[in-house]
Structure formats: C-alpha cells, structure tokens
C-alpha cells in the first residue's frame, strides 16, 4: 500500500534533482563559466600524463588504534 506513494516520491525527487542540476550546472542560470581545466582536452591529457609518471612509493603498512588514536607500524615476523 505504501509502495504506491514511496516509488513516485523517489522518482519525483530524482526528477527535481536532475532539473536543478541541469539548469544550475549546464545552463549556468546564475552566471559563471566552465573552467579551462575542465573544458580543455589538451590540459586534461597533460595532467593525466603527469599523474601516471609519478613514482608510486609507499611506507610500511600502518594500523590505526581507534581507542588511543596512535599509529603502529606493522613489522613482518622473521622466522627463526
């Protein structure tokens, strides 16, 4: 019985959200422009190259103790 009210309400809220997003972000009813970093394909390609070129280094694994809020470094056990 409640489904006939819940489903249309959810669909209506998605429709309202879509319309608001469309007019605020795409139509820019309050003004503004799209940043060059978003609209320029060449800038995006160069940024992607830069991120892919960074070396991926990491330290030892760390476990967080939520009670004391202290970080402990996990050391592997050496087998004797």
Image: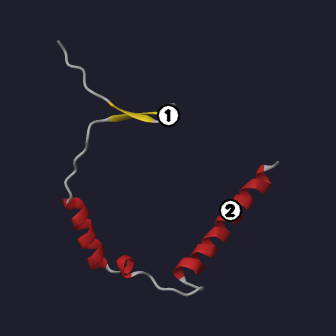
Q: Nearer the viewer, residue 80 or 18?
A: 80
Lateral position of residue 46 relative to residue 5, left or right: left
Quadrant of the rendering where the C terminus is positioned: top left
Where is residue 20? Give x, y as percent: 63, 74
Label 2: which residue?
Answer: 11
Picture residue at 24% right of the left edge, 20% below the top:
77
Picture residue at 55% right of the left edge, 87% below the top:
31
Q: Nearer the viewer, residue 30 or 11?
A: 30
The image shows residue 40, relative to residue 55, as above or below, that is below
Find numbered disc 2 in the image and state the secondary structure of the residue it sits on: helix
- How crowded pointer 2 is (Cα within 10 Å; few <14, some 14-19, many 20+) is rated as few
Mark 2 or mark 1, which is nearer the start of the sequence?
2
Picture residue at 22% right of the left edge, 50% below the top:
56
Residue pushed farthest left?
A: 80
Picture residue at 30% right of the left edge, 78% below the top:
41
Label 1: which residue?
Answer: 66
């Amino acid at each position: 019985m409640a489904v006939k009210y819940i489903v249309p309400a959810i669909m209506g809220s998605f429709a309202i959200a879509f319309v608001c997003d469309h007019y605020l972000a795409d139509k820019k009813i309050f003004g503004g422009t799209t940043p060059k970093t978003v609209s320029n394909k060449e800038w995006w390609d160069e940024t992607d190259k830069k991120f892919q070129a960074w070396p991926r280094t990491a330290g030892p694994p760390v476990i967080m103790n939520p009670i004391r809020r202290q970080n402990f470094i996990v050391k592997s056990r050496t087998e004797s």
